[in-house]
Amino acid sequence: MASELIQPHGGELVDLMADDPAAAALKSQSRDLPSYTLGPRHLCDLELLLTGGFSPLRGFMGKADYERVCTEMRLSGGTLWPIPITLDVDAETAETARAAGQLALRDVEGVMLAVLTVSDVWQPDLADEAEKVFGGANPEHPGVNHLMRNTAPFYVGGSVQGVQLPVHYDFTELRRTPAQLRAAFEARGWNRVVAFQTRNPMHRAHVELTRRAAVEADANLLIHPVVGMTKPGDVDHYTRGRVYQHVIKRYPEDSAMLAMLPLAMRMGGPREAVWHAIIRKNHGVSHFIVGRDHAGPGADSSGTAFYGPYEAQEMLQDHTDELGVTMVPFKMMVYVPGSDSYQPVDQVDEATATLSISGTELRDRLASGDDIPEWFSYPEVVAELRRTHPQRSKQGFTVFFTGLSGSGKSTIANALMAKLLERGGRPVTLLDGDVVRTNLSSELGFSKEHRDINITRIGYVASEITKHGGIAICAPIAPYAEPRRLNREAISTNGGYVLVYVATPLEVCEERDRKGLYAKARAGIIKEFTGISDPYEVPADADIVLPTVNRTPDQSAQVIVDHLVAEGYLQ
């Protein structure tokens, strides 16, 4: 009996998994093939390629598909497709893959997941890709940032044969492939399904708008959150998963279903809205909810929005007939105290009192421990959020010092540690530059590459301390802006982060130099010495700037303590 569900994009649900005999042959063959270890984005993309979530794609894009997708949002054969799906590799891997003709794709533990048969190897113009796909090259856009800072210089395209899907140990019952989700819809007799995409926790307003969308579309509801890669700083998918499991119980029985999507979002706004609709179409979805600034990253530091509020809706609407997926516009919901209900904002009289809480205000209330009212969210949802996002006075945090050798970083750091230990409440760990060099980075020199590795190691340890509720005090020189930025980004996802620039002038540092290092550097005896023969990049993003001349270490440490109290990390 023919399915009444919407047909997959391109007419066929792709399945790239090899059968058992073919998989065994690929495993045997792989011993002689060059290998490539996939990163988190690659793993998400590979999983959706193998299961048909990216139908009609049969592998990572070759150059012809890539170029036409970037310029026209279409594959080389003309099929609508808005986002490049590429495998970026280093120069050595590119050359070995080209020579061998195949590449074994492995996870970080070395498990072979698939074999790629190489069709193209090329060096893309990443700046041009950013302009065409994301509409600009502003590095504050997370998609552009990833492309320009974290993408290897070569792309390898070709068809893929799957040996094993990436392994997940969490929420296994909710991770459904397109074929499994289609089978579940058919078993329930659902042929009209409206999907809700989200990368955030759901609250009362979301439940109300999705209920209304299902009624409007005369369809059943699929809550389909992304649990792959989302925007940096988003709530982790483990917390969100527990929230969604609570929220799904708030819908009428047999009206809604919850499933998770292992997608690596690009935050590409209008193009991404079309891409999301295609992916949901492959999962059997006929209707798709799209809101204001769907899949957009918001605004940059100047307040300029990356995309217009309705560009995503307009682009998807332009392609609705071709896709066959009906867009259901997301209506902003506001709480009306007089009726104890949520209503679309455009249906509420201007004179009627309304209430709402923004995402920023919600984060502030979690950080401060302030009340989150039941009209906004459900008690069980708030409880989950507080479990993993306690108020700041109970969070771990990192104080990261940077400054020239001899600036006073270690002395101030020791004074700060003593003050924090005196207050009590959290374990305190000092990661001093010299101590770290001895115990963690003894094999490293002082080249830029080795300095970056050293700072990355310090950041990793500090991130783990912070994640587990402790206080990390880091006091390296940390001369370069980019490793400092990456550390802030990594540590901030786990708790607080305060960058302290110890702004002692170079001449004062030289006067204080008890080891004679500056004199040796000026004489050329010590090479690559920060401030003399190697640059120090003054931080533009320091949370605290400490001029230490005419200020004691105790006074400087107290400035930091006062800042931590003002920010809510200390009481």
Image (cartoon, rainbow, N blue to C red):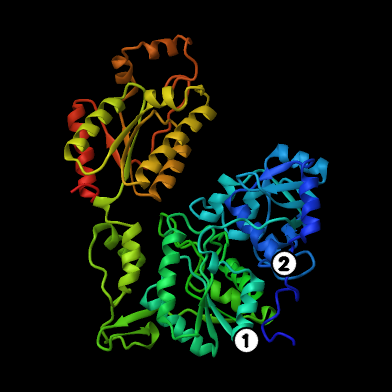
**Residue 117 shows in the view:** no
Element on which disc 2 rests: loop
Dot 2 corresponds to which residue? 74
At 28% from the left edge and 85% from the top edge, which residue is drawn? 340
Which one is in front in this view, the residue at disc 2 or the one at disc 1? 1
Asked which quadrant contains residue 503, the reply is top left
Is residue 511 found left or right of 66 in the rendered image? left
Tell me if I can see residue 303 in this picture.
yes
Residue shown at 32% from the left, 74% from the top: 378
Label 1 environment density (alpha carbons within 10 Å; few <14, some 14–19, many ≥20): some
Q: Relative to the observer, which residue lies in front, 347 or 172?
A: 172
> How far across and down, in percent of the image, does residue 380 sit?
33, 71
Q: How far from the left and from the top, in percent, is residue 549?
A: 23, 25
Q: Quadrant of residue 180?
A: bottom right
Please, what is the three-letter code of the amino acid marked with disc 2? Arg
User: Is the Cβ of the residue at disc 2 closer than 8 Å to that at disc 1?
Assistant: no
- First of labels 2, 1 by sequence position: 2
Where, quadrant-wise, is the N terminus in this rendering? bottom right
At 55% from the left edge and 87% from the top edge, which residue is drawn? 219
Q: Which residue is mark 1?
A: 191
